């Protein structure tokens, strides 16, 4: 199945509750909330590392401090979790989101796509290992779709003053 990324809008009450939980309980809360039709979610599936690379030139395994583009994908802070290799749980507070949205709005995704070849993704060992020249057009379409979906989702969350919980597992 692989490691999938999901971005979930939560209010302050839910985020504060999650900050007091351990990994297992946070995951249970995420799973429960994701079944609620009222909960806004952006799912970028396995493209999280590819999107991070496209925006920053680096794998998400190397979080870039003070980079709003990196923070868009991996958050501004991580939950205090013990299973770092199997589960990644992070968040973005509502007051941090406008600067991230601004950074994303200044990106011309078509220009970013022209900047990197499938070999660049492959040589940088970007997850998942799908970076084949013959699939290039489809992969770039999917990355564009994920970028635009994330930007729209973040804009909506900004308007509603919502926090973002990021889960990759």
Image (tube, rainbow, N blue to C red):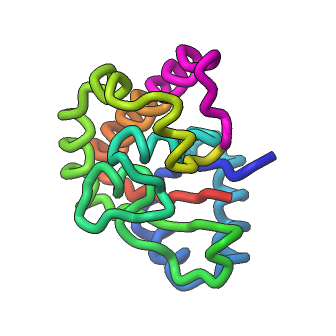
Q: Looking at the image, is 38 positioned above or below residue 135?
A: below
In what quadrant of the picture does the C terminus appear?
bottom right
Tell me residue 143's x, y (percent).
49, 29
Q: How many marks are shown on the rendered structure?
A: 0
In the image, 33 versus 103, the foreground residue is 103
Q: Is residue 69 visible in the rendered structure shown here?
A: yes
Tell me residue 109's x, y (percent).
32, 26
Q: Is residue 40 visible in the rendered structure shown here?
A: no
In the image, 9 versus 63, the foreground residue is 63
Is 35 on the left or on the right of 67, as rendered? right
Residue at 40% in and 38% down: 54
Residue at 66% in and 47% down: 36
Secondary structure mostly seen in magenta is helix
In the image, residue 133 lies in the stretch drawn in magenta: yes
Q: In the image as oriented, which residue stretches furthest toward the right?
A: 1
Q: Which residues are magenta?
A: 129-145
Residue at 45% in and 76% down: 16
Q: Looking at the image, is 13 positioned above or below residue 34?
A: below
Residue at 43% in and 51% down: 73
Q: Looking at the image, is 134 positioned above or below residue 3?
A: above
Tell me residue 127's x, y (percent).
61, 47
Tell me residue 147's x, y (percent).
42, 32
In the image, 16 versus 2, the foreground residue is 2
């Amino acid at each position: 199945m692989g490691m999938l990324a999901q971005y979930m809008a939560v209010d302050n009450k839910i985020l504060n509750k999650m900050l007091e939980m351990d990994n297992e309980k946070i995951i249970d809360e995420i799973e429960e909330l994701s079944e609620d039709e009222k909960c806004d979610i952006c799912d970028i599936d396995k493209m999280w590392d590819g999107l991070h690379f496209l925006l920053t030139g680096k794998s998400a395994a190397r979080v870039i401090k003070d980079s709003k583009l990196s923070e868009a994908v991996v958050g501004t802070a991580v939950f205090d979790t013990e299973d770092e290799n199997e589960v990644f749980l992070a968040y973005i507070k509502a007051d941090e989101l406008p600067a991230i949205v601004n950074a994303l709005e200044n990106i011309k995704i078509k220009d970013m796509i022209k900047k990197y070849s499938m070999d660049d993704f492959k040589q940088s060992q970007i997850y998942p290992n799908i970076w084949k020249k013959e699939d290039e057009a489809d992969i770039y379409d999917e990355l564009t779709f994920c970028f635009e979906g994330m930007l729209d989702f973040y804009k909506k969350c900004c308007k509603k003053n919502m926090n973002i919980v990021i889960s990759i597992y």
